[in-house]
Amino acid sequence: MSTDTPSETEPTQPPHPALDVPKARAAFGRYRFMAFVTGGFLLLLCVEMFLKYVLQVNGPDQPVLGNWIAIVHGWIYVIYAITVFDLWSRMRWSFGRILALIAGGVVPVLSFVMEVRARRWFEDRVGE
């Protein structure tokens, strides 16, 4: 006997692999925090570059706010990339989504835009 519907004894396959919701929420919280921190430092770095190279406040060879901004943003971006990977792997999103989220740390203001979009993706996946 062949039927199109699964019998009561056969388990049905869930549409998505099992999701550990508490761990996913924690990963999303870490991502959100790092998205705002990374975006803030990227904007600060853009202000530094604008003052240094466009307005030439102290000349092109001297930092205006400090060389530390680029170094700190670089290390914060590494932590941001790790939190993006953690969230992406827990949520089992497509490869395109990790590329979009990673770009948020290097394109000014994009981290804020991607945080809103990631929240929507997260809520759709978790079912809130």
Image (tube, rainbow, N blue to C red):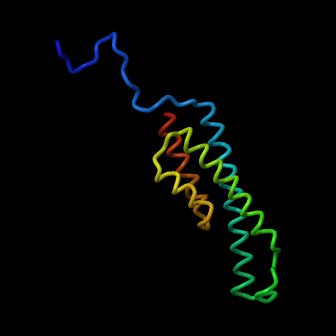
Classify 26 as above or below 66: above
Residue at the spot 53% in from the left edge and 42% down from the top edge: 122
Residue at the spot 62% in from the left edge and 30% down from the top edge: 22
Q: How many marks?
A: 0
Residue at the spot 67% in from the left edge and 53% down from the top edge: 80
Q: x, y (%) of residue 11? A: 37, 17
Classify 69 as above or below 60: above
Residue at the spot 69% in from the left edge and 73% down from the top edge: 46
Front residue of this view, candidates 99 and 114: 99
Classify 87 as above or below 113: above
From the image, which quarter does the N terminus lie in? top left
Q: x, y (%) of residue 123? A: 52, 40
Q: x, y (%) of residue 111? A: 60, 59
Determine whether, in the image, residue 43 is placed left or right of residue 69. Answer: left
Q: x, y (%) of residue 27? A: 64, 40
Residue furthest to the left in view is 1
Classify 7 as above or below 40: above
Front residue of this view, candidates 80 and 43: 80
Place residue 53 in its image quadrant: bottom right
Residue furthest to the top in view is 9
Determine whether, in the image, residue 55 is placed left or right of residue 25. Answer: right
